[in-house]
Amino acid sequence: MAKEIFNFSIDELAAKVAAVVSLNTKEVLTSDEVARYIGMSRSYVYKLTMRHEIPHYKPNGKMCYFNRKEVEEWLQQNRVATADELEARAQTYCAKKKGGAL
């Protein structure tokens, strides 16, 4: 009873921590691991691979594998500019366009 923390035993908690640490240290991930890593369903990860939207490898033509760093880069594509960055771009554009000022 002393081992119980909320609804998890210490052994269960240790197994979950080990799984997360393993996921963050592995270089090559499976589809299930990528789904957990990026917080999406496994079926959606498969859909992304079928559309060729996420970088992946099929060494034997069947199982999909993913490079963790490539997945991280994929997650960080299409960055949205902050309001300050958009304001700076607008000011630069106005200054260049016929010498206008805001």
Image (spheres, rainbow, N blue to C red):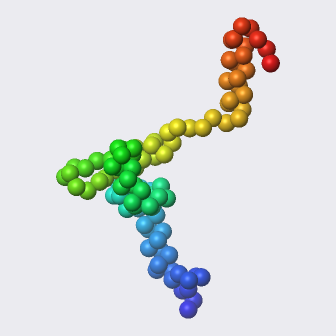
Residue 100 placement, left or right of 57 = right
State which quadrant residue 94 falls in.
top right
- Quadrant of the drawing holding the C terminus: top right
Residue lying at the far left in this picture: please name it.
60
Residue 50 placement, left or right of 4 = left
In this view, the residue in front, 76 or 49, is 49
- Quadrant of the drawing holding the N terminus: bottom right
Residue lying at the far top in this picture: please name it.
98
State which quadrant residue 22 falls in.
bottom left
Residue 30 placement, left or right of 16 = left
Residue 23 visible in image: no
Instruction: Identify which residue is drawn at 38% across, 53% down.
Output: 47
Instruction: Identify which residue is drawn at 49% across, 59% down.
Output: 39
Residue 4 point in image, percent of width and height: 56, 86
Instruction: Identify which residue is drawn at 56% across, 83% down.
Output: 7
Instruction: Identify which residue is drawn at 26% across, 56% down.
Output: 63
Residue 81 point in image, percent of width and height: 63, 35
Residue lying at the far right in this picture: please name it.
102
Tell how many labels.
Answer: 0
Residue 59 visible in image: yes
Residue 57 point in image, percent of width and height: 28, 47
In this view, the residue in front, 72 or 2, is 72
Above-or-below relation of 5 to 31:
below
Above-or-below relation of 23 to 90:
below
Residue 88 point in image, percent of width and height: 71, 25
Above-or-below relation of 73 to 6:
above
Residue 72 placement, left or right of 101 = left
